[in-house]
Image (spheres, rainbow, N blue to C red):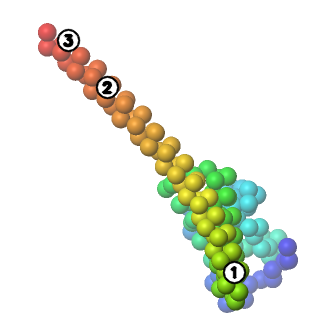
Amino acid sequence: MSAVSEPTSTQASSCYSIEQVATRTGLTKRTLRYYEEMGLLPPAERTEGNYRRYSEEDIQRLERVKELRDLLGFSLSEIREILNVEEERGTIREAFRVETDENAKVAHLDRADELILQQIGLVEQKIAALEQMRASLYTKLERHREKKQVLNHLHNN
C-alpha cells in the first residue's frame, strides 16, 4: 500500500475523504471501515498523513453494496460473493476482448456462463425465501380474517 501525496487539482475531483464518502453514501465512517475490513471495499489509498482516500469507483461500489443490502436483502457475505463474481466477470470480459484465439474466447464465455449461473442461483434462493415469507404472511392474514368472522358472528348473536 503506497502513500498518496496531497491530491493535485485533477486528483482532488476523484479523491474523497472518509467524511465526504460517508456524507455522499449515507453510510457511517465506521461502516466504511468495516466494509473495507470485510473485503466489500478494497483497502483505501492513504495520504502521507495516513488518511483514507476514496475514488469515484469506490463510491460506485459502495452504492452497489447498499443496493444489494437494502433493496434486495442480501447478507454481507452474499454481497461479497456477488462483488467477487462481478469482478471476475469483468476480468474475463477484458481477456475476451483482447483474445484472438476462438477456442480461448469460447472458454472465457464458458467461465462467464458458470459465474452468471452462480449468481442466478443466489438470486433464485433469495426469491424462494421471499415467496415463502409472502405465503406465510398471506396465511396469517387469512387466519385473522377467519377470527374476525367468528368474533363478528359472536358479537351479532
Instruction: For the C terminus, give its image quadrant.
Output: top left
Name the side, left or right, on which 48 lies relative to 130: right
Q: Residue at x 82, y 70 (%)?
A: 50
Q: Residues within 10 Å of mark 1 (few under 14, many from 20)?
A: few
Q: Give the labeled residue for mark 1.
A: 103
Q: Circle 3 is placed at which residue position?
A: 154
What amino acid is found at the position of numbered circle 3 in the picture? Leu
Q: CA distance from mark 3 to mark 1?
A: 76 Å
Query: Where residue 150 sits in the image (x, y, percent)?
Result: 24, 16
Vertical placement of residue 83 versus 137, above or below: below
Q: Residues within 10 Å of mark 2 (few under 14, many from 20)?
A: few
Q: Image point 37% across, 31% down: which residue?
A: 139
**Residue 27 occupies quadrant:** bottom right
Q: Residue at x 74, y 84 (%)?
A: 7
| Mark-to-mark CA distance, 3 and 2 | 15 Å
Q: Which residue is mark 2?
A: 144
